[in-house]
Amino acid sequence: MSYRPDISIDIPTESADPTRKINLKLNGQEITRVVSTRVLLSDFIRHNVGLTGTHVGCEHGVCGACTIIINERSSRSCLMLAVQADGAEIQTIESECGSDGTLSVLQQAFMDCHGLQCGFCTPGMIMNIRSHFNSGEKLDLSDEGIREMISGNLCRCTGYANILLAVRQAAKQLGKG
Amino acid sequence: MSTRQFGARVKRNSDPRLLRGEGRFTDDIPLLGALHAAFVRSPFARATVLSIDVTEARALDGVLAVYTCDDIGHLDQELPLLIPHDCMTNPRTARPLARDDVYYVGQPVVMVVAVDRYVAEDALQLVEVDYDPLGVEMDLEKAVKDGAPLVHATHPNNIAADFTQISGDPAAAIEKAEHVTRITVRVDRSTASPMEARTVAAQFDHVSGQLTVWDGTQAPLAVRGGIASLFNLDEDKVRVIAPDVGGGFGQKIMFPHSDEVLVPYAAMTLGRPVKFIEDRRENFIGSNQERTQIHHVELFAKKTGEIVALRDNFLHDTGAFIPYGIAVAQVASTSIAGPYRIPNIEVSFKAVYTPAVPVTPYRGCGRPHACFAIERAIDQLADELGFDRMEIRRINLIGDDEFPYKRDGLLFADGLKVVLDSGQYHKALQMIRSEIGWDNFPAKQKAAQAEGRLLGVGLAFYVEGTGLGPYEGGHIKIHPITGKVYVNTGLTTQGQGHDTVFAQIVADQLGVAVNDVIVVEGDSGTFEWGVGTFASRAAVCSGNAIHKTAIKVRKKVIEAAANMMEADIDQIELADGHAFVKGTNRRVALSTVATATNPLRYAFNEASKAATQFAPASRHDGPAMGEGQHPGLEDTDYFSPDCATWAYGVHAAIIEVDPVTCKTHFHKYVCIHDCGNMINPTIVEGQVQGGFAQGIAGALYERIEFDEDGNPINASFVDFLIPYATEIPSIEIHHLETPAPNNPLGVKGVGEAGCIAVGATVASGIEDSMKHMSEAVFRHVPITPSMIHSALFQKSD
């Protein structure tokens, strides 16, 4: 059987949505982009900038897979428009390891403790924990305290037990507890 | 010498990449100019489609194509029935897009392809579909009654399948029984909810005729076969890749969902890559679900507590279609006697069409249902005969010397016999008794009761037929440039860590580091024989196939190295990526051996330069490769189990129920678990913990709810109570390792184990916590606070 493209269709390359220019600091770099005014920040980061480490699990702000750090606070990138991030300073999972790919203490703890399985929720989980680590607050490293810390992130694979171990290991190593 | 990797707590090869955000999930794969698909879905559980008008949608800027059932050519057909079985009459499967009728809320009716998902969703709003809604019956027990509205006019009483299996002589045994326990249990509908919903992307190269499909599936080779068949293409022209997949838990084993056919179709028709990235709401209303069963169990016993026969009659909700056949119900029916001797069994079920998302396996696949039924029944038998719950189990558990224990007459979901092959059931029971503190518990319970607290202990045993056939393969080659070992198998991973456990198996045979073994799965372009990831079968089927292959490659390495170093074969040892001559410092790197076994050797690098000085390279007395020889260090082998291998375990929990909030609190949860030899205990524990969390979800939280018209009413993560870390208690895991006798590695599956016994354990514990003050029984999961409240205040639920 032969399949040929339907040449009667004129394929546009992008939507006709209104656009706006935005500037932001992403993982330490200043960037300028023209974006559709209705594009979600998560889609902008993934598809416009091309940083696909931020994952989208529900698009209604519950699962936390798309968590990034915006102006030092962990935020769900699926609940914001890209244009709302104009002028913001953002960190995504791609900023977590060293420039040579060396895992951060937190990432290494996830690896040591088997704190991930499929890895889909992991970037959002890590960025949420990173924001707690960066906050300067004294962290409650009891099981209940860590459960509360990660209670904005769903994980369907691990049952969370090893994530608790990973957070505790990293926090102790970094003197956060 | 290298230490043995099999059995070691090796860290995972895949983790650094995933942790850095360098995963390769379907939507991460850059496809230049990709278009996006979205679906108009039925808003009615059952309706006749009167008309579809797509004129306005087609006219919207940025919309490339709008497909109804009239626009998809030969694909407008009922999709394949994957697993036929004689007990189904005229089994019904869905069309890619509805024609004339819709059968559940969420069924795809129209597909839009646009420049991006935003425009595609705009266009969905412009499609006008006129429906004539029909009556529905969502209640499984009412759906089989005469006069109930029919899902398919072809199927009276909505019966999709009716099947009975018999083991032993139940009629005779029942006649002699001294006691009968009767119980009805219910398990509600749920969904797998992988964190990455389902995904498909396709690209068609009109020049080469090559169709490439990236599919977040558990069975890429099956998808490849299905697409080749439905599109009438040579298999060779279809490459299906399961890239990183963000959890599956069974939902991604079924093929084809509509999008898996229509996205490739659109890519071929439009000449551009097309993607469908399912959103969460679509996953709730459009992707397959599982769980609803209602079991009526009768246990026939002697006064001594010995169970002589079991009769189970159950209803199984198959949803609007039955594309995966009776697999879920059949697994439940063959698991119903659990770990108990019960020599006489009669188990029947009716699979029932309901106007809801079709039912195919979700982690556990009938096993949690069967476990809940038999374990709740055994608890009740204990109560009625005045036995301790531990004791009634001890009396009936199969003894170590009774293995292999056959249940003649029962056929498992793979069509093969049910033989519980091995185990130490009694030891497991003793371990849980001691670990949970069974003997001290009554005193603790009394003390708690004196303070007005409700404290109970729950207990449940489970078995799990794992490692179903028919087969998997393993292909191994040692790369001549790097000396790294490449391994392929036909099934694929959704996060289980195959790339590490398979690497451990290979590392032991070839004496290389685990992270120098590169496992590539899920790509029909690299290995095209295999089945898929389901039924806790990866370690058993692919693991053993890879092990067998590794032994063959080891032999080749040793022969080549012996030749190169002019030593005897039995003098060669493999370790640290090298072949050594025992007791000497003579050694050669595997990359060099691999290079030397390829007669074409340009001097690319040191390995190839080094290779030229060895014996095979200097051969001048005939062809470079003798008859029957094969260049390189490479081989393939397969493993095909003679039947499932049965893992098992026992759970116990000390649970406190708050009489005011009706919330449950776990003081302790213990799992004794045996999956045969463990390749990597850390990964085994991860599987058990993850399964356990889904078990807790099913025991206390998760249920897909419909209103009486068949509308899902909690189809989001806001309303569907998927647990966060705050809902999952800690669990203590203790291992037993009884080697499986029927495969070379002695392994059994573990993927589903963790979830199976949780519902039964939790129900048993909650019931025990209020036994002193309430007649209430817990035979329905999930157990909600309202159910506990009703129980405490003696209202019927």
Image (cartoon, rainbow, N blue to C red):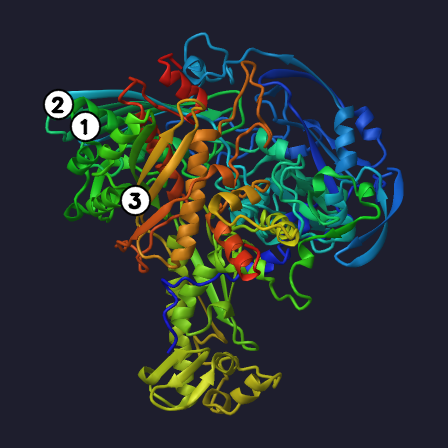
Mark 3 vs mark 1: which is more N-terminal? Answer: 1
Residue B164 x/y as whole percent: 30, 26
The answer to whether tags 3 and 1 share a subunit is: yes
Residue A61 x/y as whole percent: 66, 36
Q: Which residue was labeled with disc 2?
A: B177
Q: Residue at x 37, y 91 (%)?
A: B584
Measured in 3D between alpha carbons, the distance from the residue under mark 2 to the one under mark 3, in whole angstroms, is 28 Å
Above or below for B458 versus B474:
above
Which sits in the foreground, B246 or B48? B246
Q: Which residue was labeled with disc 3?
A: B648
- Are circles 1 and 2 on residues that touch, CB within 8 Å? yes
Judge left or right: residue B66 versus residue B485: right
Question: What number of labels is visible?
Answer: 3
Q: Which residue was labeled with disc 1?
A: B309
* Nearest-to-viewer mark from 3 and 1: 3
The amino acid on which the numbered mark 1 sits, given as a three-letter code, is Ala
Q: Is residue B56 shown to the viewer in this render?
A: yes
Q: Where, quadrant-wise, is the C terminus of chain B in this rendering?
A: top left
Chain for disc number 1: B
Q: Secondary structure at mark 3?
A: strand
Above or below for B716 versus B149:
below
Judge left or right: residue B756 versus residue B339: right
Chain for disc number 2: B
Mark 2 Cα shell of 10 Å, populated few (<14), some (14-19), many (≥20): some
Residue B390 x/y as whole percent: 21, 36
Mark 1 Cα shell of 10 Å, populated few (<14), some (14-19), many (≥20): many
* Nearest-to-viewer mark from 2 and 3: 3
Residue B582 x/y as whole percent: 34, 86
Q: Residue at x 40, y 26 (%)?
A: B658
Which sits in the foreground, B376 or A143? A143
Mark 3 Cα shell of 10 Å, populated few (<14), some (14-19), many (≥20): many
Judge left or right: residue B730 versus residue B203: left
